[in-house]
């Protein structure tokens, strides 16, 4: 039997199986989905558990079960087990995406061995359809074909049935990040080649959007004399400064030096990076075994590490 919109049939069995078919036409890129609403006498759900969809496939103790498939869905009803508070079950199809129901090749509701109903799709602009209703009438159950369109998709449809839908969180646009190369262009163009390599490596390891404080703790004990003289320490500082510019949006890097004693030095920025190591070596008189003035020549790491940890707590 083929039903027309508004037509109903009695349901004489304790169980019912409905199938919805919604194959797409070429060029349809959205996702059709079946949703059901278990409604009370006022036509509303009594709670979110009465909203059956892909995240909640059954309700009322399993008396109604949804089995979604590819371009179709099957719904099983144990009509004699549905609570008395439920007077009606609305069977709906909604489209997740930019298409409307006119982009479907067919939209059909079938009651196993009893009836079929085809929704007229010509010129339709809705994103949701109330396909039909299973409802109580004088102590028995009936099925009514509807094909009633609903504008706006799932959210307004669910709200109309009393589902508590949380409003979407406001998306605050984030300012676009300036590329590392762009940051260095004006003040440290000599470091751009380092920045390009760093950018590739950071992106590869998914660190290119990380924000962090960067600190440079410098061993200035006697064993480092050769590294200072050859310029290796300044070269390492250049590399770390590039990372600091990337990770820390204020463009500064904390610096400590240590040997027997330790000291916090002025922050490194792109303005003072060039020649920074030579500059702090020349801030005062050095004894014959000192690399940085006043720090001595032996290695004593624990005090400086404790200070760094306390500083960033």
Image (cartoon, grey):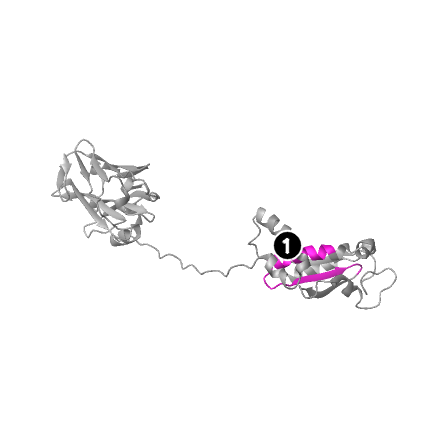
* Residue 255 is one of the magenta-drawn residues: yes
Q: Tally the numbered discs.
A: 1
Residue 223 in the image: x percent, y percent?
A: 82, 53
Residue 246 in the image: x percent, y percent?
A: 60, 57
Examine the image and state in which quarter residue 160 appears: bottom left
**Under tag 1, what secondary structure?**
helix
Judged left or right of residue 198, residue 173 is left
> Residue sitting at 74 percent across and 63 percent down?
276
Residue 183 in the image: x percent, y percent?
A: 60, 61
> Residue sitting at 80 percent across and 66 percent down?
282
Q: Nearer the viewer, residue 181 or 157?
A: 181
Position of the C terminus by quadrant? bottom right
> Residue sitting at 67 percent across and 62 percent down?
254
Q: Nearer the viewer, residue 40 or 289?
A: 289
Q: Nearer the viewer, residue 62 or 2?
A: 2
Residue 266 shows in this picture: yes
* Residue 172 is one of the magenta-drawn residues: no
Decide: is 298 above or below 128: below
Decide: is 83 above or below 214: above
Q: Residue extending furthest top?
A: 113
Residue 35 shows in this picture: no
Position of the N terminus by quadrant? top left
Neighbours of disc 1 within 10 Å: few (<14), some (14-19), many (20+): many
Q: Residue extending furthest right?
A: 288
Where does the magenta region start and end? 235-260
Judged left or right of residue 39, residue 223 is right
Q: Residue extending furthest bottom?
A: 284
Residue corresponding to mark 1 = 195
Residue 203 in the image: x percent, y percent?
A: 57, 49
Judged left or right of residue 43, residue 252 is right
């Amino acid at each position: 039997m083929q039903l027309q919109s508004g037509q109903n049939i009695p349901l004489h069995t304790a169980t019912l199986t409905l199938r919805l078919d919604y194959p797409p036409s070429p060029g349809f890129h959205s996702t059709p989905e079946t949703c059901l609403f278990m409604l009370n006498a006022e036509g509303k759900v009594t709670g979110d558990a009465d909203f059956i969809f892909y995240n909640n496939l059954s309700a009322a103790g399993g008396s109604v079960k949804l089995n979604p498939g590819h371009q179709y869905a099957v719904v099983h009803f144990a009509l004699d087990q549905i609570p008395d508070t439920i007077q009606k079950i609305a069977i709906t199809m909604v489209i997740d995406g930019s298409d409307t129901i006119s982009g479907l090749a067919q939209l059909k509701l079938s009651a196993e061995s009893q009836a079929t109903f085809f929704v007229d799709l010509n010129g339709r602009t809705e994103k949701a359809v109330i396909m039909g209703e299973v409802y109580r009438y004088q102590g028995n159950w009936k099925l009514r074909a509807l094909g009633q369109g609903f504008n706006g998709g799932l959210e307004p449809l669910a709200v109309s049935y009393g589902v508590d839908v949380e409003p979407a969180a406001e998306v605050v646009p984030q300012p676009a990040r300036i590329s590392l190369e762009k940051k260095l262009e004006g003040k440290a163009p000599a470091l751009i080649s380092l920045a390009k390599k760093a950018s590739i490596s950071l992106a590869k390891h998914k660190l290119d959007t990380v924000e962090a404080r960067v600190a440079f703790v410098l061993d200035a004990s006697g064993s480092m004399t050769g590294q200072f003289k050859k310029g290796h320490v300044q070269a390492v500082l250049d590399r770390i400064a590039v990372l600091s510019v990337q990770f820390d949006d204020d463009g500064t890097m904390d610096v400590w030096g240590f040997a027997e004693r330790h000291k916090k030095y002025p922050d490194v920025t792109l303005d003072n990076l060039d020649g920074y190591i030579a500059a702090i070596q020349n801030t005062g008189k050095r004894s014959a075994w000192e690399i940085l003035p006043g720090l001595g020549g032996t290695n004593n790491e624990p005090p400086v590490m404790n200070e760094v940890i306390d500083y960033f707590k």
